[in-house]
C-alpha cells in the first residue's frame, strides 16, 4: 500500500461520483423513511393498480330487491364478533347505505385524494419557493413580494375558496369535463392559497445564505445570479422546503375533504377519502368501519409522506450523511 | 514623471471609495455613509505581493472585495491587467473574472457544504471553460496535486476536512482558471499557527511556480513581513503608509505604523521588557463620522495643530515610500496659518 506508484493510475482514485448515489445510500439507511416509502408505494399501488384486480364499480347503485340485499353490508371481519352480521366475500369492506362497494370507493377515492394532494403540494411548493427565493435574493423585489405574501395571508381563505369555486366551476366544467374541471379548480385553489408559509421561511433562509462567503465566492468566480440560486442557494434551503412539502400534502388532502364536505368540491357521487369520511360521520356509531378506513388511509398516507420527507432531508444534507 | 514601476503594474487602484449608505428615520432618508474605504490608491506590480495591514474594522477586507468589484464601488478607478473594471458591466466583468480570483478568510464558510470537493474546485471550470468530463476531472486532480490534497478526497464534503485542508480547497478553486491576480483576504486568520505556516508557504510556492500576484490582506504583521514585498498600512478607510517591506519594518514613518509595529510581540524576554512601546489611547473613530483633518489625529501621539484641520495628502516622501502625514509633507510649513476651505 505504501508504494502507490506501482498501482495502475486509473485504479488509484475513485472517480468523482454522482451525488445522487450518496443521497440514495443515505436514504436507504434511514429506516423510517424506507418503511414510509414502502407503505406509500403500497398505497399508490393499491389505489391505482387495485381496480385492475378488484372489478367493482364504485359508482354502481343497485336498485329494487338487489338494493335491499346489498345495502349496509358490514365488512367481512365483522363475523368475528357478530355471527349474524350481513357480510359477503364479494364486498370485503362492506357497502354503504345505498349499496355501493366500500373497497372500490376507497380505491377510486384514493386516486383523487393522492393526486390532489401531490399536485396541490407541488404547485404551492413551486410558488412558495420561487417567491421566497426571489424576495430573499433580489433586494428590489423583497418589499413588493413580501407585501403580496402578507396580502394572501390576510385573506379569509375558506370564504374565498367557496366564492372562487362558485365563480369558476361552470367555465372549467365546460372546458375539461365535470371531474377534470373540478380537479383543476381544486388543485389550483389549494395551491395558490397555501404557499405563503413556504415563501416566508425560504426568504428568511435565503437572506442569511446570500451573505455567506461561499455565495460571494461564487460571485467572484463570475457565476450569474440564476446559477448561484440553483447551485448554492436552493440546495441549502432544501430542508425547510422539504418539511413544508410533506406537511403540505396532508393539509391539501384535508382541505379537499373540507371542500367536498361543504358541497363545493367534487360532485357528491364522486368519491374521495375526505368525502367518504364526511358522508359516514352521521352513522358513525352503527358503522364505524366507514369512518375508520378512509381516516386510516389519510393518516397513513400523510405519515408515510412525512417520513419520506424526513429521510430525504437527512439524505440531502452531507453533514448528516454517514451517521 | 512616470515611474517605471507603474508601467509594469498589473493592478492599479486609484482613489477607490466604497461608501455604504445609512438610512434612518421613518422615511428611510439617506443620512450618511459608512466610509469603509475612503480614497485608497496603490499599484501592484506583476509577480509581487502587496501586504495590506491594519486593525480590524479599518476596511481591509472591504477594500479587497471592492478591488474585485464584488461590491459596486462608490468611485475611483481599478485597472487590472489593462482593463478598467471600475465601471464595467456585470457581463464584461464575468469575462474578466478568470484573471482575478479570491481566497477567503473563513475556509468553513467559503465552501458550499452541499458540494463535494470536486464540485467546488470544478465550479469555475464549469463557469468559464468548455472542458469535456475527463479533461475537467484531470484538471481538478492537477489542482488538488498543486495544493497538496490527496486525490481520494475528491468525493468528500467540506465538513470532513480540517481548517488547513479546507483553505487548500479554497486556494485550488482560486487557481482553477489560471488567474494572474489573487486577493487573499486574511487566508490564515482562522487557522492554527502551525497550519498558517503551511498555507503561507503553499501560497509562496504557487507564486513562484505560477507567477501569481497577490494582494495579501492580514492583521498579522509578522506573517506579512514573511510573505509581502511591499506593505500598505490602512487606518480608518485610508492607506497611511505604503513602503517596501524592509523599509517599513526597519524605519516606519507614520506614527500609526510605529504604534502598530511596536505592538508586535517580541520573543526575546529581555528585549520584550525594555522595548519602547507606543501605546495608543482611545478607540478608532466611527467610519461613518471620521474626524476632521487627519483620520488619525484623535489618537496620534505626535499630533499637531494642522492635523485637526487639514487631511494630509498621500505623498511620495522618498523613492518608493508614500506616507499620508503632515510630519513629512511640505504643507506643514506653508499651509499652517491659512484657513481651510
Image (cartoon, coloured by chain):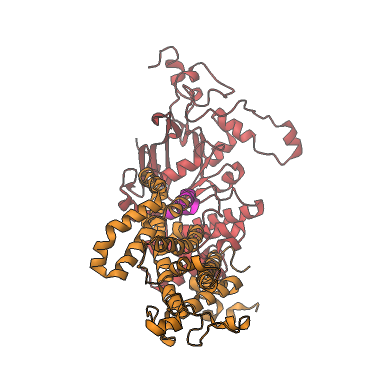
Chain colours: A orange, B red
Q: Position of residue A230 (x, y in %)?
A: 41, 60
Magenta stretch secondary structure, dominant: helix
Task: Please report the residue visible at 57 percent of the width from the left and 37 percent of the height from the top.
Answer: B55
Left-right relation of B254 to A97: right
Look at the image and say whether residue A212 sits in the magenta stretch: yes
Nearer-the-camera pick, B251 or B89: B89
In the picture, which quadrant includes the N terminus of chain B?
top left
Per the rendered image, the range of residues in magenta is A202-218
A100 w.r.t. A285: above or below: below
Nearest the camera: A178 or A41? Answer: A178
Q: Is residue B9 visible?
A: no
**Residue A232 lies in quadrant:** bottom left
Magenta run includes residue A165: no
Q: Nearer the viewer, residue A207 or B220?
A: A207
Mark yes or no: residue A258 visible. yes
Work out whether A275 lies above or below B199.
below
Question: Among all residues in the image, which is located at the extreme right?
Answer: B270
* Residue A267 image position (x, y, % from top left): 35, 68
Q: How many marks?
A: 0
**In the image, what residue occupies the spot 56% across and 40% down?**
B246
Q: Does A190 sit left or right of B191 as displayed?
A: left
Quadrant of image for the C terminus of chain B: top left
Counting from the top left corner in percent of width and height, residue A101 is at: 44, 80
Question: In this view of the protein, which residue sits in the foreground, A153 or B10?
Answer: A153
Q: Residue at x 63, y 80 (%)?
A: A81
Q: How far across and how far down the image is residue B186, in percent?
A: 54, 47
Amino acid at each position: 500500500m505504501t508504494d502507490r506508484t506501482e498501482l495502475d493510475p486509473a485504479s488509484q482514485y475513485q472517480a468523482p461520483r454522482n451525488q445522487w448515489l450518496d443521497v440514495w445510500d443515505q436514504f436507504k439507511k434511514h429506516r423510517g423513511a424506507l418503511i414510509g416509502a414502502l407503505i406509500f408505494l403500497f398505497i399508490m399501488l393499491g389505489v391505482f393498480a387495485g381496480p385492475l384486480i378488484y372489478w367493482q364499480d364504485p359508482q354502481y347503485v343497485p336498485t329494487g330487491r338487489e338494493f335491499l340485499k346489498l345495502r349496509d353490508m358490514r365488512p367481512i371481519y365483522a363475523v368475528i364478533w357478530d355471527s349474524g352480521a350481513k357480510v359477503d366475500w364479494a364486498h370485503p369492506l362492506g357497502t354503504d347505505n345505498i349499496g355501493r362497494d366500500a373497497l372500490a370507493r376507497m380505491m377510486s377515492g384514493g386516486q383523487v385524494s393522492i393526486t390532489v394532494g401531490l399536485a396541490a403540494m407541488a404547485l404551492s411548493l413551486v410558488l412558495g419557493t420561487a417567491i421566497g427565493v426571489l424576495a430573499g435574493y433580489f433586494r428590489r423585489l423583497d418589499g413588493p413580494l413580501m407585501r403580496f405574501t402578507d396580502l394572501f395571508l390576510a385573506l379569509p381563505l375558506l370564504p374565498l375558496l367557496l366564492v372562487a369555486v362558485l365563480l369558476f366551476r361552470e367555465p372549467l366544467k365546460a372546458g375539461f369535463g365535470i371531474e377534470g374541471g373540478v380537479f383543476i379548480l381544486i388543485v389550483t385553489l389549494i395551491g395558490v392559497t397555501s404557499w405563503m408559509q413556504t415563501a416566508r421561511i425560504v426568504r428568511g433562509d435565503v437572506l442569511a445564505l446570500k451573505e455567506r462567503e461561499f455565495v460571494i465566492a461564487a460571485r467572484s468566480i463570475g457565476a450569474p445570479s440564476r446559477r448561484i440560486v440553483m447551485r448554492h442557494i436552493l440546495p441549502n434551503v432544501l430542508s425547510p422546503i422539504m418539511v413544508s412539502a410533506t406537511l403540505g400534502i396532508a393539509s391539501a388532502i384535508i382541505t379537499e375533504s373540507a371542500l367536498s364536505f361543504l358541497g363545493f368540491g367534487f360532485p357528491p357521487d364522486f368519491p374521495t377519502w375526505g368525502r367518504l369520511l364526511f358522508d359516514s360521520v352521521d352513522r358513525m356509531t352503527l358503522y364505524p368501519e366507514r369512518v375508520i378506513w378512509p381516516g386510516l388511509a389519510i393518516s397513513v398516507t400523510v405519515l408515510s409522506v412525512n417520513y419520506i420527507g424526513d429521510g430525504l432531508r437527512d439524505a440531502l444534507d452531507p453533514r448528516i450523511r454517514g451517521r | 514623471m512616470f515611474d517605471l514601476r507603474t508601467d509594469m503594474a498589473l493592478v492599479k487602484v486609484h482613489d477607490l471609495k466604497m461608501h455604504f449608505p445609512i438610512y434612518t428615520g421613518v422615511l428611510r432618508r439617506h443620512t450618511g455613509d459608512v466610509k469603509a474605504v475612503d480614497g485608497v490608491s496603490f499599484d501592484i506590480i506583476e509577480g509581487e505581493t502587496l501586504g495590506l495591514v491594519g486593525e480590524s474594522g479599518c476596511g481591509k477586507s472591504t477594500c479587497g472585495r471592492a478591488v474585485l468589484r464584488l461590491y459596486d464601488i462608490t468611485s475611483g478607478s481599478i485597472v487590472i491587467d489593462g482593463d478598467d473594471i471600475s465601471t464595467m458591466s456585470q457581463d464584461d466583468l464575468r469575462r474578466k473574472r478568470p484573471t482575478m480570483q479570491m481566497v477567503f478568510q473563513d475556509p468553513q464558510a467559503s465552501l458550499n457544504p452541499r458540494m463535494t470537493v470536486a464540485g467546488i474546485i470544478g465550479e469555475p471550470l464549469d463557469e468559464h471553460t468548455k472542458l469535456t468530463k475527463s479533461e475537467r476531472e484531470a484538471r481538478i486532480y492537477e489542482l488538488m496535486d498543486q495544493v497538496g490534497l490527496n486525490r481520494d478526497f475528491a468525493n468528500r464534503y467540506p465538513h470532513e476536512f480540517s481548517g488547513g485542508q479546507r483553505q487548500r480547497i479554497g486556494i485550488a478553486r482560486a487557481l482553477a482558471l489560471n488567474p494572474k491576480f489573487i486577493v487573499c483576504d486574511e487566508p490564515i486568520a482562522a487557522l492554527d499557527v502551525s497550519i498558517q505556516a503551511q498555507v503561507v508557504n503553499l501560497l509562496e510556492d504557487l507564486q513562484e511556480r505560477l507567477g501569481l500576484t497577490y494582494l495579501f490582506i492580514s492583521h498579522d504583521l509578522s506573517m506579512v513581513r514573511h510573505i509581502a514585498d511591499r506593505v500598505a498600512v490602512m487606518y480608518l478607510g485610508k492607506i497611511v503608509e505604503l513602503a517596501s517591506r524592509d523599509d517599513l519594518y526597519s524605519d516606519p514613518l507614520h506614527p500609526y505604523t510605529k504604534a502598530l509595529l511596536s505592538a508586535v510581540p517580541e520573543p526575546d524576554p529581555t528585549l520584550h521588557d525594555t522595548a519602547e512601546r507606543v501605546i495608543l489611547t482611545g478607540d478608532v473613530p466611527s467610519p461613518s463620522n471620521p474626524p476632521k483633518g487627519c483620520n488619525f489625529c484623535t489618537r496620534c501621539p505626535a499630533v499637531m495643530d494642522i492635523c485637526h484641520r487639514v487631511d494630509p495628502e498621500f505623498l511620495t516622501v522618498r523613492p518608493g515610500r508614500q506616507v499620508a502625514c503632515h510630519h513629512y509633507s511640505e504643507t506643514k510649513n506653508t499651509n499652517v496659518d491659512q484657513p481651510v476651505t
